[in-house]
Image (cartoon, grey):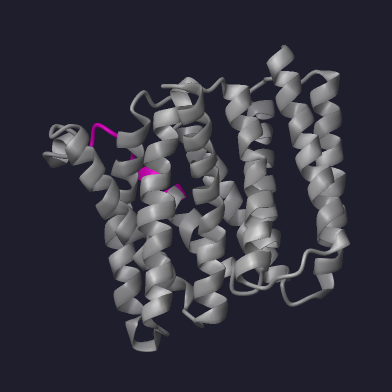
């Protein structure tokens, strides 16, 4: 793969990851779509797209239930479902940039905490980065403690914990695309049940459904497929640094498409949290 292709595809996947936040806010805020219907449509469309990609790649990937069981696990699928459901519910009250920042911070803190409990020590630079990120996160959260979005903040943080656990559970997979596809397929019954249960009270519009389909089929399904294509070409530290851009891209998407403001409080918090994570990543690279 050429350098230009690698850069282009990497940037495309980062935009896709950020687009999940934007699509969710557009559906829930502008179209008043209920979060569970959004989650069900997102999971279902992502599972179908990933199934198709897996079939095109290799007919052996999902040709039978026994083959499906060779990839992923129900434990990973439960983490994935918890993330997707919490993600949608939290965005009922959270702005795009705020939700993306909380999600990203919770994912990183979860993975760092698990690594620490596993006995992996950090050097002084990495430790300083964690402290900076934590203090910045506390600074970011304090004003939310007395606002209606506190529940959304907590739910999004839990969604981030679930995504962090999902990432850790699948970190050793040698067939990342197949594992992701298999886990989305395992979530398919839950997604269909969600849509059926909430159908009597569902708030659906054609544009809201389109946003949910775009989040599942494009941002999740095709986005993950491209990401796993470029990931082997990237050093792990480069991949981690690249993902620091996701909350920033989501913030700009919120400004441009959802007419959300960017406050100084959010900007300072973002600089602190993402800057601290950057120190942790760079410190790992030097170890």
The answer to whether residue 240 is left or right of residue 65 is right
Residue 115: in magenta span: no
Asked whether 27 or 174 is in front, the reply is 27
Could you tell me if residue 157 is visible in this image? no
Task: Tell me the quadrant of the picture where the N terminus can be found.
Answer: top left
The answer to whether residue 101 is left or right of residue 203 is right
Residue 157 quadrant: bottom right
Could you tell me if residue 13 is visible in this image? yes
Q: Residue at x 53, y 23 (%)?
A: 234
The answer to whether residue 152 is left or right of residue 198 is right
Task: Tell me the quadrant of the picture where the C terminus can be found.
Answer: top right
Residue 165 lies, with reference to residue 21, above or below; the image says: above
Considering every residue shown, the one lying at the far bottom of the view is: 200
Residue 148 quadrant: bottom right
Asked whether 136 or 72 is in front, the reply is 136
Q: Residue at x 49, y 43 (%)?
A: 12
Asked whether 39 or 112 is in front, the reply is 39
Residue 72: in magenta span: yes
Residue 199 quadrant: bottom left
Q: Residue at x 51, y 23 (%)?
A: 3
Residue 247 lies, with reference to residue 109, above or below; the image says: below
- Magenta residues span 69-79
Residue 242 lies, with reference to residue 215, above or below; the image says: above
The x and y percentages for residue 235 are 56, 20
The x and y percentages for residue 35 are 48, 73
The x and y percentages for residue 8 are 50, 36
Q: Residue at x 15, y 41 (%)?
A: 65
Considering every residue shown, the one lying at the far top of the view is: 287
């Amino acid at each position: 793969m050429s350098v230009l292709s690698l850069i282009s595809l990497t940037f495309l996947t980062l935009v896709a990851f950020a687009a999940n936040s934007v699509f969710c806010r557009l559906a829930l805020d502008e179209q008043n779509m209920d979060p569970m219907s959004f989650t069900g449509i997102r999971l279902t469309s992502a599972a179908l797209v990933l199934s198709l990609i897996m079939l095109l790649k290799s007919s052996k990937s999902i040709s039978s239930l026994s083959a499906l069981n060779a990839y992923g696990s129900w434990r990973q699928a439960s983490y994935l479902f918890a993330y997707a459901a919490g993600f949608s519910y939290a965005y009922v009250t959270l702005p795009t940039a705020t939700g993306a920042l909380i999600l990203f911070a919770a994912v990183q803190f979860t993975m760092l905490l698990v690594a620490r409990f596993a006995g992996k020590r950090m050097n002084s630079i990495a430790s300083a980065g964690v402290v900076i990120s934590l203090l910045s996160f506390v600074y970011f959260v304090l004003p939310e403690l007395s606002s209606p979005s506190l529940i959304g903040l907590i739910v999004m943080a839990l969604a981030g914990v679930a995504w962090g656990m999902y990432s850790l559970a699948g970190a050793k997979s040698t067939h990342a695309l197949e594992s992701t596809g298999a886990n989305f397929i395992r979530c398919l019954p839950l997604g269909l049940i969600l849509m059926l249960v909430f159908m009597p009270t569902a708030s659906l519009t054609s544009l809201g459904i389109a946003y949910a389909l775009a989040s599942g089929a494009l941002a999740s399904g095709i986005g993950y497929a491209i990401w796993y294509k470029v990931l082997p070409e990237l050093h792990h530290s480069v991949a981690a640094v690249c993902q620091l851009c996701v909350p920033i891209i989501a913030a700009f998407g919120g400004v441009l498409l959802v007419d959300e403001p960017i406050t100084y409080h959010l900007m300072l918090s973002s600089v602190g949290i993402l800057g601290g994570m950057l120190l942790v990543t760079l410190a790992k690279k030097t170890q």
